[in-house]
Image: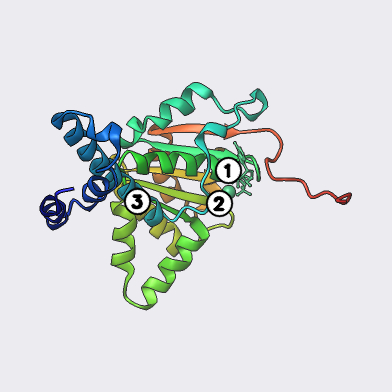
Amino acid sequence: MNQENYKKLKELNLSNMAAYYQDYNDVKEFMSLDFDSRLSVLLDFEINARRNKKITALAKKANFKIKPDITTIDFSPERNLDKELFSKLTSCTWISQCKNLVIAGATGTGKTYIASALGYRACMLNYKVAYIRVPRLMLDINISKADNTYNILMNKYKRVDLLILDDFGLAKMTAAETRDFLELVEDRDNIKSCIIISQLPITNWYDVFFDPTLADAVMDRLRSNSYIIELKGPSKRGILKNDIE
Ligand SMILES: Nc1ncnc2c1ncn2[C@@H]1O[C@H](COP(=O)(O)OP(=O)(O)OP(=O)(O)O)[C@@H](O)[C@H]1O
Ligand SMILES: [Mg+2]
């Protein structure tokens, strides 16, 4: 190996390429390639390593609670999950079109799982994603009002390409919570995408908001610009057995 070239690659911050250059210098198959092919292998290695690092960073920032395996999604008919729609959603075109996705269904039907799978997919395609449960979001907003970081917090959630709001509708919102929620959803309307997840059927969402007029405003936007998945069937959670040996 040419030590000077190795040092130059490091100096240029091409450390993955440098590592490959060092490790594969005595591998016969690599050395038997012509110059262009070897250069191409080294460049691909650098590009892939950088891409993977970026995806890992985006996924970490998104704050997912689970890491689903997209290949294990269950499409059995009783779940009411349309394979064609799901596969369309994995392309993430809907995110570039600033559309939303609503996922409703009873507890354990796999709403968080599916949303997280799509969120990971979005990270892989370079979108900035944030996952947060609505009760936690409301708590964080209240805290931010007390320590004067409200704008910083709201801007953080307004800026991401895909905002995943889980567990919407677990409790009725206060007047202030309704206003904060609407500010977030309305500011993102037609500019960024949301996945909103709830155990409540969509027709019951109006009742979650404090003010029916504001509820109308947000529901109108969501309904006109959203894909909808209504999961059905039994819970996917493991059933505790009493007869464990
Ligand atoms: N397609 C799937 N393949 C494998 N495991 C799954 C699948 N969908 C869901 N699960 C598992 O089933 C459990 C329940 O799923 P999840 O947490 O997504 O349900 P949920 O609808 O969000 O429930 P809740 O409304 O209570 O939050 C989790 O442990 C999850 O990992
Ligand atoms: Mg959930």
Amino acid type, label 1: Asn
Label 2 CA crowd tier, 10 Å (few <14, some 14–19, many 20+): many
What is the x, y in percent for residue 234?
Answer: 71, 36
Residue carrying label 2: 169
Q: Are marks 1 and 2 in contact (CB under 8 Å)?
A: yes
Residue type at tag 3? Leu
Residue at image coords 22%, 53%: 15
What secondary structure is marked by label 2? loop
Instruction: Estimate the x, y position of residue 64 in percent, counting from the top left.
Output: 47, 52
Nearer to the camera, 92 or 180: 92
Residue 116 appears at what percent x and percent y? 48, 44
Quadrant field for ligand 1? top right
User: Crowding at label 1, few (<14), some or many (≥20) Cα neighbours within 10 Å?
Assistant: few
Residue 217 image-quadrant placement: top left
Q: Of marks 3 and 1, which one's residue comes earlier in the chain?
A: 3
On the picture, is 108 further left or further right than 140?
right
Compared with 84, 98 (above or below) is: below
Asked if disc 3 and disc 2 are in contact, CB closer than 8 Å, the reply is: no
Task: Tell me which amino acid carries mark 2.
Answer: Gly
Measured Cα–Cα span from mark 3 to mark 2: 27 Å
Identify the residue position indicated by label 1 in the image: 204
CA distance for labels 1 and 2? 9 Å
